[in-house]
Amino acid sequence: MTDTAAAAAAPIIDDEANWQRLHPATLALAIVKLGPRSLNFLPAVAALGFTGNWVWIVPAILAFLLFSLVAAWLHWLRFRFLVGDDEVVIESGVLSRQHRTIPFDRIQDVSIEQGLVSRALGIAKVGFETGAGGKENDADLDAIALDAAQALRTTIRAHRSGEVAVVAASDTPDAPLMAEDRLLFAMTPRQLLLAGLFNFSLAALAVVGAGMQFFDNLLPFKFNIFNPMDWADVAEDFGLDQWLLAHRWVAGIGAALSLLLIGFASGIITMMFANFDFRLTREPRALRRTRGLTTRTDVAVPVRRVQAAILVTGWFRQRFGWHELRLQSLASDGEKERDHQVVPFAQLESIDPVLAEVAITRPDGDAAWKQSHRIIALGGLVGALGASVGGLVAVSFGQALGWFGPVLGVLIGAASLFGARFHRWTDLGEQVAIRRGFWKPKLTLLPHASVQSVDLKSDFILRPLGLATLVFGVPGGSSLASHEIPAIPIATARALRDRILTARARA
Amino acid sequence: MTDTPAVHPTDPFDPAALNAAEGLDPVDPAYAQVLRVATALNLIPLAIGASVLDYMLVRHIEGPYGLITALAWLVAIIVILTFPSRRVSRWGYKIGDGQLRVARGWLFRTDTIVPFVRVQHIDVGQGPVERWFGLSHLIVHTSGTHNSTVTLPGLPADLAAAMRETIRRHIQTDFA
């Protein structure tokens, strides 16, 4: 009896040693996650309070905490994974068990993600991208030790690239290039500085201001940098108020200059931290990017999995020919964004070789750009109308601040009318190019073969005008790329849809 | 294949016109019953909620008691009786030429095409209400982020299974 049971269980016991659990610090992470989740509990607390059962509030909260912790612990206890020779097996579930096998061959890429808390604990969340659409189809190990995560990624990458030696991710970022690796793009310090200057941003000021407002009550002094009254008080303290009144032009110029200084400095600093020693190399199967001053990251974008290219610029830097290149790929690499910045700041002639590596071309000067219909400004105009009406209603109730509404409305309306002129597209035979935006012009280069599905949308506004919107389903989303051609004549849309769908799958 | 009527439909609200003009096949009319049950399950609790609110609140503040209840039930009944059949007539599909085409909606109409070779996997699902009327829905998964699932409801169960087989054969031949 016991023998047969042991024999039946033998193959499982054999594996037992290889099964791994998540890092115990995951439980600490669960406690942190309880914070936002306890909001769900607020109505119950309120109900207890309203009904006069004050005595029960503390026990109820304690019971909730205890229950959540036990649940987290049970989850941890019942979650185990096994890294085999060519597959990952994950077993999870407290009551209903789930057993999932992911062959290494099917893993497009392994992402490693660390939040603030997990960084302090030295653990990382490992995500397996399997290329199946939808987030729920991807498996995670949340979370294991950071070095284990990196080892796992190396193992899987080594498996995928056959017997080719894989440079360990973070240990030797400056390993000598292999013979077949070519340097495609690098940022020189001068270029980095220039990029930083164009990266002018007052976001740092806003962050400081928001932080001060948030910690207002905790700060030992009472001062809000966005409150002119506070500044006036300080000036008074130092006897500066008379001087300020006397020299208000000098003071104004000084304020403007310091704002400029803060903007440029924060732009340069963020650029330095992110893109210090930026190198993009061509490996046999992938583009490899290493960058960063304090945290160096090492990301490989497999060339065959690149789905689309996005060229981003700004209204000002465009005049000097500076662009940024991002590649949308099926694989994401531990970053929040699904697209990869492969060239942060360069002239078009240095971007073209990179595009050539992924077999995407940029439309040349004489491409026949077609415009979307002006009707796409309608959404913005409705918003502008809403803002104006709301503001005027507020004014009619005697609230002077309401005048902001119409002013804002006019600005929004003008911006959307103006911006609508920048929606253009052209079909280059093998790929579609979509351009949009005035403030931050973006050019999406979408090979026909990347398109998985096509929506032809029309509604009660577009239909009477004989227009339709084309929306393309493309693997690996991107917040920047819009795979959408809005408001074009319906016959054109149909013809384009047919042309795109006849394209063969991307090799 | 279906014969496209030569006369152009003049009434855009004519249920048959929209699909015929675009060369689409309609879904099973019985799907209207499924939608009706689903709508009823959504709206009747709302109407009951409105009645309770009416009873508890409006009566106490001496408002027009009964008005909200009557309106809520009237709207619910009208919506349950009339909307489902209209919504069903806006659904259309076409399978063939190596692609699946699904169109839906009128106010906001979306016409989706998924080539069979781009299908990752296929589900045929059946909810309890659908089973009652012998219907199934077909869900096609693609690897695109937009349209990662395309759902076609209101198919007779055997047709849904046949469509699944058709698409499955194409997936296999592509990788062979």
Image (cartoon, coloured by chain):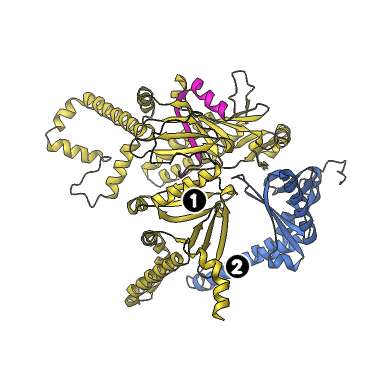
**Residue A345 sits inside the magenta stretch:** yes
**Eyeballing the image, is A356 above or below A205?**
above
Residue B115 shows in the view:
no
Residue A354: % across, % down: 52, 27
**Residue A143 sits inside the magenta stretch:** no
CA distance separating discs 2 and 1: 45 Å
Q: Does residue B52 appear left or right of residue B25 in this picture?
A: left
Residue B102: % across, % down: 72, 48
Q: Observer-nearest residue: A60 or A90?
A: A90
* Quadrant of image for the C terminus of chain A: top right
Q: Which residue is mark 2?
A: B47
Q: Does residue A145 appear left or right of residue B102 in this picture?
A: left
Residue A375 shows in the view:
yes
Q: Colour of chain A?
A: yellow
Which residue: 21% across, 49% down?
A219
Residue A505: % across, % down: 68, 38
Which residue: 36% across, 60% down?
A28
Look at label 1 and name its amino acid. Gly
Q: Please give the chain letter of the residue carrying mark 2.
A: B
Residue extent of the magenta highlight: A333-358
Q: Please give the chain letter of the residue carrying mark 1.
A: A
Q: Observer-nearest residue: A141 or A3?
A: A3
Q: Which residue is mark 1?
A: A127
Which residue: 38% across, 41% down?
A171
